[in-house]
Amino acid sequence: MQKISMDSINKKICEISGILIEELTILGQKEIENETCPICGQKMQKRYVEQHDSIRTVFGPCQHCEQELYEKTKQRQIENERKQRISKLFSISELGESFQKKTFETWIHNVKSENSYNEAVDYIEQFERYNGKGIVFYGGVGCGKTHLACAILHELIERGYVCLFKTLPDLFTQVYQSIGQENGIKESEIISILVTVDVLFLDDLGTEKATDFKQEFLFKVINGRYLSNKPTIITTNYDVNGLQARIGDKITSRLIEKCIISHNTAADYRRKFKDE
Ligand SMILES: [Zn+2]
């Protein structure tokens, strides 16, 4: 863990000393003679400060308050570092233009995808009433399922939900990198974020056959969300049997139980609509 700079600690101590000197001035000479901390009542430490070319004796913070301040400053710094690591791993702003463009407004209608589109619109309209139910979009490559899932996410972000969007291969690359680092975010911490976020969107589930580690990781995430009744949005190229073969039965059965399944039958959407 990175050390807190002594400068920042000293600065804080000086700030507190300043507060104490002010308070002591208000309290009067009697309190100064008592050398007791006005915050906790314990004995204070003698300190010498330079003032107008002379050295003055003041009473600095007591050891108890000083230690408490040090601990608090350290905790705050650790928490800030943790937040920075999390935002680096899960920043939705990193998704860029491609995500920004995928909204209901930019959806290009075509007969074969109409069903999926209607299900996405229904899902967002009934979202609160669905009470924790997620949605799985499945269909061939380029059928627009990621577009619909992103469109849902845009609406939910606008409603104030905390949403995360991760493409699964990317997620695992980041998980491996982070776990390998000395100061990296812990696996349990990543799982806890993925479980507790309001809405989680996992793109491309089952694209690569999950190893034991990945299956275990995914199960902890999906099962955690299942137990806490939080909606998960999934896109996949695979139907139920395909998913069972690639990510295992345990994860697949949790998803089926907690998600609306939307089958998109459109052929190669990207080939037809180049501007996606
Ligand atoms: Zn004190």
Image (cartoon, rainbow, N blue to C red):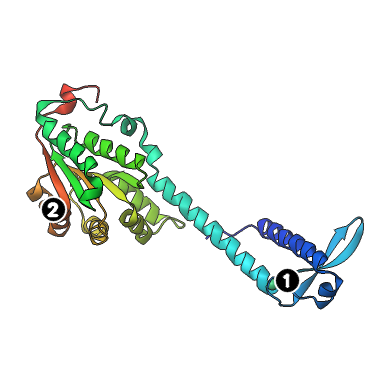
Where residue 213 appears, x then y in whole percent?
25, 58
Mark seen at residue 20: none
**Residue at image mark 1:** 38
Is residue 168 shown to the viewer in this render?
A: no
Residue 87 is left or right of residue 229, and the answer is right
Give, as a three-letter code, the residue at label 1: Pro
Question: Which is more foreground, mark 1 or mark 2?
Answer: 1
Residue at position x 64%, y 70% from top?
67
62 up-or-down from 166: above or below = below
Say if mark 1 contacts mark 2, CB within 8 Å.
Answer: no
Mark seen at residue 256: 2
Residue 239 is left or right of residue 58, and the answer is left
Residue situated in front as seen by the camera: 221 or 232: 232
The image quadrant that residue 229 belongs to is: bottom left
Give, as a three-letter code, the residue at label 2: Ile
Mark 2 closeness class: few <14, some 14–19, many ≥20 residues within 10 Å? some
